[in-house]
Structures are given as structure tokens and as C-alpha cells.
Image: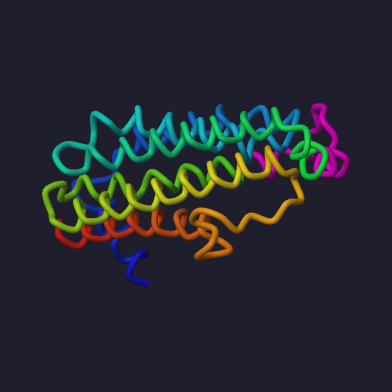
Amino acid sequence: ALITYATGKALSIDGPPKALLGRVFVGCAACVAPGLFDLHLAYSFGYGAAMVYQAALWSRAAPGLAAPLTVMYTLYGLKVIIFQAARELRGGYVAKFLTPYREKSPRGFDPKKLPAVLSTAVLLSCFSLPVHAATRAPRHLSVSIGGIIAAAGLLLQTIADAQKYFHKSRNGADSFVSTGLWRYSRHVNYLGEIYFHAGLIIAGVGGAVAA
């Protein structure tokens, strides 16, 4: 309820930048469009590309303390792209995860994939709302705190994913990871993901409420 209120309040102040929000959706749709051929591309490379695209689009509209949020979006998007590319070069990952997935959803253009691709574009477009809300009050302390939490979450997730990747590259896709950060949590990479998005929400809600 608080997030809904803050988002509505942020969008109502001075009127939402409809043209900019429209470009967000069009750009996200373009990023995930390859999913019409291979649905996996929409959820992986398309996801990362959409985050980088949004960061570039919002960078001029995010002055002051809101600007670091666009940096977080860029780094997150690049991390998704690089990590996915690295995984697809590992035969064990392809055999265990990617091949079975593509057997269920074969590659090749299929109009039936359109709803999934469009819904993904809409979802990714919503990722721009925290930045937009933060621009309402870019110098508010909560925007800075949210950015710090997001940065910490991204760092945690990146380190955990790198440790998992190198472990499985050496020991096989089915090997159990119990070293590094994985000694302390079975889902440490997801914990980093939660912190990343929580930081963005804190920044957005704080900026909206303070506006």
C-alpha cells in the first residue's frame, strides 16, 4: 500500500513525463523482442539490456543524488548480460538448464510468445518507476540510503554469482557450493538481489513521500 501510494504521488507531481515513460516501454520492448524467436533471450540478455537502456534514458532526468541510481541500473544490467554470456559458454549449464528449457519452448518465431514478451516489457518498464520517483526529491537522505543499499546488494550478488560460477566450472554443474559466501547462506545471491531491489524501492518511496 505504501509503495502504491508513493508511486501514485510521484507520478502526479508536475505530471508524469508521458513521452519519457513511453520511450521506456518502447525501448524495453525492443530489448526483449528477440524473445519472439527464443523466449530465453527475453528473460536473460533482454532483461540486462533493458536495465542499461533505462539507465541511459533516465540519466538526464535524474539530477543530484538520484543519479547514482542510474549507475546502479547500468552496473546491474551489465552484470546480467556478462554473467549470462559466461554461463552459456559452460557446457554443463547448457546441458542441465538451457537445453531442457529450449525443448519446452523451441527456438523459432512463434506469435504465441508475444504475450510473454509484451508482459516482460511491461514489467521491465516498471523498473524505471523508482528512479522517476526519486527525481521528485533527489537530495532527500532516503534516496542516498537506498542507493547505498542497492550498491551493497549488487556487490553481494556479483561476488556470490562469481564464486558459484567458478566452482561449478571446476567441479561440474551438479557440484555443491559450500565455500566463500556460500558457507553462510544457501541463497546468498538471491539475498543480494533482494537488497538491490529493496534499495531501489527505499530510494523511490523516500523521494516520492518527500516531494
Q: Answer with the quarter of the image where residue 171 lies.
A: top right
Q: Is residue 101 magenta?
A: yes
Give the image location of residue 107, x and y in percent. Answer: 82, 30
Q: Is residue 17 above or below residue 53?
A: below
Q: Magenta part of the protein: which range?
A: 99-118
Residue 90 placement, left or right of 147: right
**Quarter that holds the C terminus:** bottom left
Residue 203 placement, left or right of 23: left
Residue 107 placement, left or right of 209: right
Q: Residue at x 21, y 56 (%)?
A: 145
Give the image location of residue 67, x and y in percent. Answer: 22, 37
Nearer to us in this view, 76 or 130: 76
* Label tally: 0
Q: Is residue 131 magenta?
A: no
Q: Residue at x 63, y 41 (%)?
A: 43
Question: Hey, which residue is sitting farthest bottom in the picture?
Answer: 1
Give the image location of residue 128, x and y in percent. Answer: 38, 43
Q: Answer with the quarter of the image where residue 81 lies.
A: top right
Give the image location of residue 203, x and y in percent. Answer: 26, 55
Assign the magenta stretch its main secondary structure: helix
Nearer to us in this view, 163 or 48: 163
Q: Residue at x 37, y 59 (%)?
A: 198
